[in-house]
Image: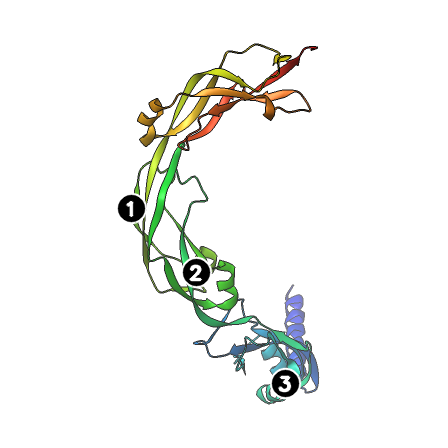
Amino acid sequence: MANLKVAALCFLAAATFWVLNALNKDNYTTVVEFPIEIIFDQEEFMAVENLPSRIKVEINGNGWDLLRKYFKINETPFLIEINNPSTKNYILTSEIRRSLAESISPTGLVSMVSDTIKFNVDKLVTRKIKILPDTTSNSLARNHRLVGKMEIDPEMVNVKGPTSILQQLDGVLKVPLGEDRINKSFNKILPLEAPEKFKDFLSLEEESVHIKFEVIQMLEGNKRLKVKTLNFPSNVSLQNEVNTVIMSYLIDERKVEELGNFEFEAVLNYNNRNREDSTIKVQVSPRPNFLENIKFEPEILKLKYENP
């Protein structure tokens, strides 16, 4: 056992000596990822994607120097300054080869593995964007309606950011109302923020917006209506005799009293029949604009023709 330990120690010492001796030699060649930093005027431009932080290069030199670069020990990034990065989204590595070679001295630069360094930097601009309440979800309660014009203050806001990000807004900044199934008039001051995915890119001049609007309820109702036939020839009748139909509807809660001023009829106008299947649809007369979702039971009736 003691002999094995001695042999192992001798082997380790020999290997260490060989490695140290090898690292002291010159003329080694390897490929490493060298750190870079792209710099530009950040008051005028902004990166819309992560900037490249390393480039692959083939280098030649002393073993110790190559080892330090391979394991990224005490590295100082190579600075690449771009005057107008929004006009071109790449730089040729041939343009920086000489200055990079000087930067990594005494290690020698053999070649650049890639011929380009790509980046995505946009010019910063300020645009006036329209503010709109986000009503795409279940903002209003069932059978409730928005009436009149929404009051929005301010209606426009200045937004600063990269041109490509501002274009994605399409001129509109949607503001969540913070409530679902709203069943009464709305009057709130809401925080004004960029969409979550754009927060790192956009800055807004205003911090809040005042939104106000009126909400009314549409009440459900139904009526039994007498059937009135129009323009029927003498040899045409209904296949199933119907004297009345049931009309269901929604009505503006503010118009309920006006409903009593109307005498409704279920009209069957022969001139409006479907010639292909000999059917006719029920229509109501009159039809005031404060009634919505009007439905009939039955809604379609079959016609019967007799020989003249």
Front tag of 2 and 3: 2
Q: Which mark is residue 95?
A: 3
Residue occupying the point 45% across, 76% down: 42
Task: Please state the horizontal and vertical placement of residue 130, each as a whole percent of the image.
Answer: 41, 58
The kind of secondary structure element at disc 3 is: helix
* Disc 2 from disc 3: Cα separation: 35 Å
**In the figure, is residue 182 to the left or right of 24?**
left
The kind of secondary structure element at disc 1 is: strand
Q: Name the residue tied to disc 1.
A: 187
Relative to residue 283, is residue 122 depicted above or below? Answer: below
Q: Quadrant of residue 106?
A: bottom right
Q: In the rendered view of the protein, which quadrant contains the C terminus?
A: top right
Task: Please state the horizontal and vertical placement of residue 142, each as a whole percent of the image.
Answer: 41, 32
User: Which label's residue is closer to the chain start, 3 or 1?
Assistant: 3
Task: Please state the horizontal and vertical placement of residue 272, each as a whole percent of the image.
Answer: 59, 26
Residue nearer the viewer, 14 or 69: 69
Residue occupying the point 38% across, 60% down: 156
Q: In the rendered view of the protein, which quadrant contains the N terminus?
A: bottom right
Residue nearer the viewer, 4 or 94: 94
Q: Quadrant of residue 95?
A: bottom right
The reply to whether residue 241 is visible in this rendering is yes
User: Which label's residue is closer to the chain start, 2 or 3?
Assistant: 3
Task: Please state the horizontal and vertical placement of residue 98, each as a whole percent of the image.
Answer: 63, 89
**In the figure, is residue 222 to the left or right of 100?**
left
Identify which amino acid the numbered label 1 is placed on. Asn
Residue occupying the point 43% across, 39% down: 138
Identify which amino acid the numbered label 3 is placed on. Glu
Identify which amino acid the numbered label 2 is placed on. Lys
Q: What is the crowding at mark 1: few (fewer than 14 residues within 10 Å), some, or many (at least 20)? A: few
